[in-house]
Amino acid sequence: MIADVTKLSSAQKRIVRISAAVLTLVLCAALLPLAAMRAQSQDDAAYWRDLAERHVESEDLLGWSAPYGLRAASLTLAADEVEGARVLMRPVGADLRTFDATHIQRARFDAAEIHCLSEAVYYEARGENFAGQTAVAEVIMNRVNHRVYPDTICGVVYEGSERSTGCQFSFTCDGSMNRTPRGRSWRRSQLVAEHVAIGFAPPRTRRATHYHTTAVDPHWNDSLVQTGQIGVHVFYRFPNSRERRELRERDL
């Protein structure tokens, strides 16, 4: 039975008004986080759409072949395709490709981290094609995720650079950085760095953590397992326990 408000006393009416105000505040407190989540999802969708289109367009502008057979004109991404942190990219005429919360999180790498990765791509592989450049960037990301290396991109790239010898990437200590990155090669390096850091590029190096060019034969490669060659770079990973035994037996 619903009370007739017109027959209530002043005190009772005041209680009703206070109760209504409290209920309104409770509803607002409950709905505000939902609205914020929705706004964040829309922001993610807009950011991801722009980033995906820039990368697909860049493949045409820079003379790369699109790794997923996509073209900017065929790429669509709607905000209502976002659920929580899940974003869907639907290329027309191609299979649906799904990007999850991990990709969204990686898309927010600090600008300084992306800059360090861009420098590594530029100085180490600017003469390589798309596959060769992404492979070099992938090695750096593999090191970030490996327990024996620093857990940041800049930490990996500049490890040992403070010493006269022992830098992990030669460009950080051999004077290469006296030449400022510029032009089309620098723009390409930046795009590759974003591409790999976010997770657009499929794995190419089979978990490699090391590489060298075909022009050299460093002593350390004897203790590692070669995973392949892309362009002028040969890639290696740490051996597992069985492979370590085989390497020791080979050296006896």
Image (cartoon, rainbow, N blue to C red):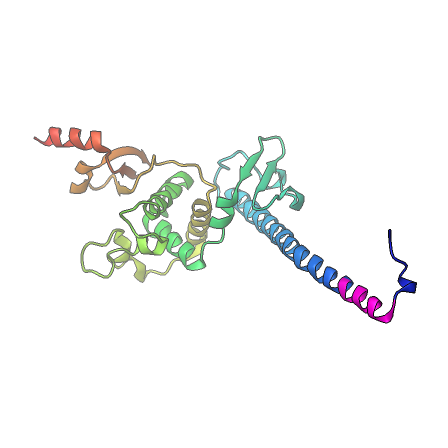
Query: Residue at 60% across / 48% down in the picture?
Result: 45
Q: In which quarter of the image is the C terminus?
A: top left
Q: Is residue 163 above or below residue 227?
A: below
How far across and down, in percent of the image, does residue 107 sit? 49, 50
In the displayed structure image, the side of residue 5 where residue 51 appears, left or right: left
In the displayed structure image, the side of residue 162 where residue 17 appears, left or right: right
Q: Is residue 240 above or below residue 84?
A: above
In the displayed structure image, the side of residue 36 where residue 183 appears, left or right: left
Q: Camera-side residue: 11 or 133?
A: 11
Q: Is the magenta stretch mostly helix, strand or loop?
A: helix
How far across and down, in percent of the image, does residue 237 sit? 27, 37
Residue 10 painted magenta = yes
Query: Residue at 27% across / 37% down in the picture?
Result: 236
Q: Which residue sits furthest right?
A: 6
Residue 197 painted magenta = no
In the displayed structure image, the side of residue 212 where residue 186 appears, left or right: right
Q: Camera-side residue: 26 or 192?
A: 26
Query: Residue at 87% across / 54% down in the picture?
Result: 2
Q: In which quarter of the image is residue 70?
A: top right
How far across and down, in percent of the image, does residue 250 sit? 12, 29
Residue 218 visible in the picture: no
How far across and down, in percent of the image, does residue 201 sit? 45, 40
Residue 106 visible in the picture: yes
Q: Camera-side residue: 34 or 167?
A: 34
For the image, the number of numbered tags is 0
Q: Camera-side residue: 30 or 72?
A: 30
Q: Quadrant of residue 242?
A: top left
**Magenta extent:** 9-19
Query: Residue at 38% across / 58% down in the picture?
Result: 181
Q: Is residue 80 above or below residue 178?
A: above
